[in-house]
Image: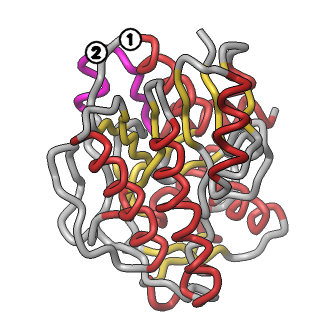
Amino acid sequence: MKIAVTGPRGRLGQELLALSDEFVECEADITDFDGLEYELNEINPDALVNCAAFTDVDGAEEKLKYREAISVNTRGISNILEISWFPVVHISTDYVFDCRDGPYSEADVPKNPVNAYGYSKWGGEIMCSLHQEARKPVTIVRTTGLFGGISGKPDFVSAVLSHLEEGKVFVATLELRGNQTYTPFLAEGILKYIKSGHRYDVLHIASGDIITRADFAVRIAERFGYDTDLISTAFNYEIPNWKANRPSYGGLCTDRAGDFGVPIYSTAEGLDAYFQAKS
């Protein structure tokens, strides 16, 4: 089986490529329809995972960057689906919801995202829905709170550890709730889903438990042997340098994935794997 990966230099894209030689790079810019069509014809994949995304939540609040977010997160997946003759897995997020009464199941309908990034991802889901109505095989896989993996890209865990290693206080929000998901576990779940033969319009693959960022920061300190008194708590509006609103009661229900064998791991298991990878 040959599975194309758009966005192969990103956190998840790199993880998929390292997981199995069934994944192959698609380096085309998904906003360039002609270039994308040419490369996909060259690859001739059996399936595709769209990992290409604009993920700068605060940057998307700026007018020019919001246009970029829409171009990648909304129009980009539309280009892929117009070209595709193969099943597509599109990566999305719980930020497509207003996140006032999560966690959300696959049956819940996205509405009223709280920031520009969320709107751009919601637009991508709408594009997927339109193609699903035309009976194209596309699955929206929602995840959230990614950390770790071979890319080495900065994430919440590395930010916490960098403060603790220097004996500095880390400020974490009491409000932002969600699944804290270890990237290699997500990659494993996506491969399992593609090879299972099941087809859903929407599927959630994330950690099995939902906690606040403040709780997660404490767990990180405990797992790595640092003083938990260095974790300070605050509300969303008090977090330095946040331009965009953050949702408060988000998170994803993952029962559907577990029902047909996609592994759903806990936050603790993700942190243990992260710790072992760092050791």
Dots 1 and 2: beta carbons under 8 Å? yes
Q: Residue at x 79, y 37 (%)?
A: 278
Q: Position of residue 271 (x, y in %)?
A: 59, 39
Q: Which residue is mark 1?
A: 196
- Which of pointers 1 and 2 indicates the residue nearer the eye? 1
* Label disc, if present, on residue 44 of the rendered structure: none
Q: Which residues are magenta?
A: 255-266
Is residue 169 rendered to the left or right of residue 73? Answer: right
- Residue type, mark 2 in image: Phe
Q: Secondary structure at mark 1?
A: helix
Residue 185 counted in the magenta span: no
The kind of secondary structure element at disc 2 is loop
**Mark 1 or mark 2, which has the lower sequence index?**
1
x and y, in percent, of residue 140 in the image = 37, 42
Query: Residue 5, relative to residue 43: is it above or below?
Result: below
In the image, is 14 to the left or to the right of 256? right
In this orientation, which residue lies closer to the viewer: 240 or 18?
18
Relative side of 260 to 13, left or right: left
Disc 2 target residue:
260
